[in-house]
Structures are given as C-alpha cells and as structure tokens.
C-alpha cells in the first residue's frame, strides 16, 4: 500500500470521507486521492513524491503559479507583523481600491473569507435592498453552499415557476427556503422572459456564473446576457455576477469586461486572494450602502480583510496587472486546447474543447455544450478512463467531468508539450480499450 492510500485511510477516521471538500475524494472517478506535500509553479508532488502537472491550480486561485516567489515574500512580510488584528488596515483599502479600479462596476467592496460568504452576503444585501424574497439561479451553476443556493429545479420548462417543483440538492435545507429560489436553464431566453412576465416584481436578484465553471466551462449566449440585464433593470431586480471563478481569470476585468455587461453586484474570490482564504462582494454604492454599519443589512467577519490574505491578494493582482499577462495566459491555454483536440481527433475519440483566458473546458462530446442538459450527455466513461490514464502519466485533471480546468502563467510551452505527450498516450489507450 502506498503513502497516499495510507493517508486516505487515516484521514477517513477523523475527517468525514477523508476530505475537507467533497470533490477531492475522487468519488466520480474512483481511486485514491493524491495527498499533496508541496508545489512549485505548474507542479505539485504527492505523498509518494510523484510529480504532477497541476491543471486545477486549487480550483482557480493559483494563476501566477504555486509558491510564486513574489507572493511568498509578500505573505512572509505580512505574517511577521501578526496574522490578524480585527481592526482596519491600510492594506484592505489598497485591495479595495485595486478591485474597484480593475472592475469599474464595483464602486464599493466588502471583504469576506470565502466565495460562499460572498454570494450568501450578496443575496442578503439584494433582498434587503429590494425588500423582496425571490431569487433566480441557473441550473448547473454553483454559488457556494449557502442554503438558498443549494437548490435545483424540477424538469419541464414551464414548471419552473411552480415552487413545489424545486427540491433542495442537499439534506438540511428547509423546503420553506427553497420556495424562494427559482432555477432556470442556462442560456434559455424564453424561460427567463416567462418568469419575469409572471413574477418580475417579486424577484430580488438573479445570480449567475457569467461563464460557468461548475458544470464544466459553458459560455453564455450574448442575447441571453443582454435579455438578463434588460429584464432585471426593468423590474428593479439586482443582477449579481458570481465571478468567484472568472474574476481575474478569464480577463483582468473579469467576464463582465469581455461581455460588456454592467452587473449591480459582483462576487469575487479565488484569484483575488492568490490562494489565501479571502473573497469579496461589491458593486453599486447605492446598494452597498445598505450594509451595516451604514444600513440595516448585517454582515461581519472576525477574519474579514485578514492582513496576510490581503498581502497575497494585492501581490497576485499586481502581477496579473502587468502588460501582456492575459495575452500570454490565453495563448498558452489555447495552445493546450488545440493540442488536446488534435490528439483526440488523431485517436478517433470524440472530444470538443473551449477556453477563455486561463480557464478551459474539455468535453467528451462531439460539440461544445451550451447547457447543463447538454453537458450531462457527455461520455463519463471516456472521461474517467482519460482521467486515470493522465494521472498515471503525471497530469492532474479535475476529478470530475463537470468541472472546468485551470492553467497558470507558469504553464509554458514546455509544460504544455509534456501534457500533450501524455494526452496522446492516454487517448490512444482509450481508443484501444
Ligand atoms: N461561486 C463560484 C462560481 C464558485 O466556483 C465557487 C467555488 N468553486 C464558489 C462560489 C464558492 O466559493 P468557496 O468555495 O470559496 O466558498
């Protein structure tokens, strides 16, 4: 038995499922999760000292590479002056200023400690601001694990407005809460129009992943987004862009800068902390001023704006702001996707690919999917085989067919060539089996 397996057995004794976040347990793909001992640039090493090229990068945050020397130095400097004060610091202002500068729709921003807190607080704020209860989310979008957001719709296009069709996707979420969340299919303009026609005046907020990463990468249709913006404005509902994953990853100004949409509120996390537990939500000053201590919507946190996390975030945002960063990241990621597609085609395995900035989708399907329904029709068996063949070759993909992949600026041509060489072997094996 190897060290990873030893650790997995030991972990399961004191940690439910042996992991602190479910997807790490390899449930969809089977096998033994790798326990990480250290990482550098695009690589990490497991408990058996095997090296992997990392294609999840902590699910997004590590865009400048693992253990980036500049970020490590900034963090060490901050850590030496204590980890937390519970009182304001200048660094928090600098981080807020930088975010507002990079994302002009964000006029004011509040720091929290996780993406879940950001979306949960943004929803509370939207409800407090509008005095309404109803929220709309889209099928297949994940916005963290706040109760109101752990909901999926029943099937059938026009049953969505019937709240009895909604069911919590997690135990412990009251049915009473679920009735305030409507779930619509992603990219479905007619469904959106129908709901706003019937219930528009009750909708506090619509929350969306403006490019999804939690049902693999799916891009929105431009008309879907413009309809969404127009309907929410018309009905006085708050449009919340959940850019926890896309913010500073698909482009310096996030998905909103690529789409030309100005949301009312934006949720951020991941890259903004460079791997430290920090996240944020922000947007129109008029809405943000309803937050305590100015307004009556309560939100707080002992470790909010933590100085060590702020130092990591500030340095990471400084690095990604340097000229040419996203051009390079985008071209490296595109090079990877082109190579993967070619390797699959050569072996005759049906695969399609897509990417934006440093985020990519690899689908075991003929065509790039546009909705949750389409993505769930991809070939999961092929994915599982490919995942394990790649793992064997030292390439660490997300252990689920429904997650996007992530690159960093350290995934240079040499690293990409190594991934593609492994992929050729993996696809050939898949075509044979
Ligand atoms: N929103 C989105 C779009 C996410 O991808 C995630 C996490 N993957 C979250 C919210 C929740 O963030 P966290 O895991 O930091 O709570």
Image (tube, helix red, strand yellow):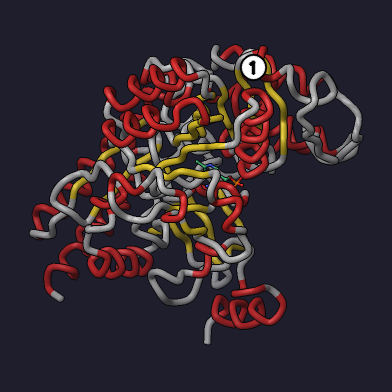
Q: Nearer the viewer, residue 2 or 97?
A: 97
Using the rendered view, name the quadrant where residue 389 is placed: bottom left
Using the rendered view, name the quadrant where residue 70 is placed: top right
Looking at the rendering, the quadrant in which ligand 1 lies is top right
What residue lies at 40% left-to-right and 35% top-to-bottom? Answer: 358
In the picture provided, is 94 more to the left or to the right than 238?
right
Q: Position of residue 71 (x, y in %)?
A: 66, 34
In the picture provided, is 169 more to the left or to the right than 88?
left
Q: Nearer the viewer, residue 220 or 216?
A: 220
Q: Can residue 71 be seen by looking at this rendering? A: no
Q: Position of residue 277 (x, y in %)?
A: 69, 43
Q: Secondary structure at mark 1?
A: helix
What residue lies at 25% left-to-right and 70% top-to-bottom? Answer: 381
Q: Does 95 appear above or below 154?
A: above
What residue lies at 27% left-to-right and 65% top-to-bottom? Answer: 380
The residue identified by callout 1 is 98
| Label 1 CB sits under 8 Å from any ligand 1 atom | no
Q: Nearer the viewer, residue 350 or 319?
A: 350
Q: Position of residue 17 (x, y in %)?
A: 59, 74
Number of numbered discs:
1
In the picture, the quarter occupied by the C terminus is: bottom left
Q: Position of residue 319 (x, y in %)?
A: 57, 24
Using the rendered view, name the quadrant where residue 364 is placed: bottom left
Farthest-out residue, bottom: 1
Q: Can residue 262 be seen by looking at this rendering? A: yes
Label 1: how many residues lie within 10 Å, few (<14), some (14-19) or many (20+)? some
In the picture provided, is 316 more to the left or to the right than 412?
right
């Amino acid at each position: 038995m190897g060290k990873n397996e030893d650790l997995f057995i030991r972990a399961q004794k004191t940690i439910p499922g042996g992991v602190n976040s479910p997807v790490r347990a390899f449930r969809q793909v089977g096998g033994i999760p790798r326990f990480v001992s250290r990482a550098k640039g695009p690589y990490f090493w497991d408990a058996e000292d095997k090296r992997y090229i990392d294609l999840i990068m902590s699910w997004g945050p590590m865009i400048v590479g693992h253990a980036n020397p500049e970020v490590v130095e900034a963090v060490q400097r901050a850590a030496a002056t204590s980890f937390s004060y519970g009182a304001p610091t200048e660094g928090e202002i600098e981080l807020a200023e930088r975010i507002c500068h990079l994302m002009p729709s964000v006029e004011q921003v509040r720091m929290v400690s996780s993406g879940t807190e950001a979306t949960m607080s943004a929803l509370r704020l939207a409800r407090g601001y509008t005095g309404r209860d109803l929220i709309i989310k889209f099928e297949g979008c994940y916005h963290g694990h706040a109760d109101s957001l752990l909901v999926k719709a029943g099937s059938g296009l026009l049953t969505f407005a019937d709240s009895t069709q909604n069911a919590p996707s997690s135990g412990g979420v009251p049915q009473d809460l679920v009735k305030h969340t409507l779930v619509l299919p992603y990219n479905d303009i007619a469904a959106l129009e129908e709901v706003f026609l019937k219930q528009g005046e009750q909708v506090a907020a619509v929350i969306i992943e403006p490019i999804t990463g939690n049902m693999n990468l799916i891009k929105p249709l431009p008309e879907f987004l413009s309809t969404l913006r127009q309907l929410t404005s018309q009905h006085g509902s708050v449009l919340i862009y959940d850019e926890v994953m896309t913010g500073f990853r698909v482009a310096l100004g996030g998905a909103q800068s690529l789409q030309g949409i100005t949301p009312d509120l934006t949720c951020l996390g991941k890259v903004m902390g460079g791997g430290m537990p920090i996240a944020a939500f922000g947007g129109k000053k008029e809405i943000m001023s309803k937050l305590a201590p100015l307004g009556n919507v309560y939100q707080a946190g002992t470790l909010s704006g933590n100085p060590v996390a702020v130092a990591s975030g500030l340095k990471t945002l400084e690095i990604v702001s340097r000229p040419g960063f996203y051009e390079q990241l985008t071209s490296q990621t595109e090079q990877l996707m082109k190579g993967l597609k070619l390797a699959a085609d050569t072996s005759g395995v049906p695969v399609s690919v897509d990417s934006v900035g440093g985020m990519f989708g690899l689908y075991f399907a003929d065509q790039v999917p546009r909705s949750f329904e389409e993505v769930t029709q991809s070939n999961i068996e092929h994915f599982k085989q490919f995942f394990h063949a790649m793992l064997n070759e030292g390439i660490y993909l997300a252990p689920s067919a429904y997650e996007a992949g992530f690159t960093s600026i350290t995934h240079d041509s040499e690293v990409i060539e190594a991934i593609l060489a492994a992929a050729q072997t993996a696809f050939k094996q898949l075509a044979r089996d």
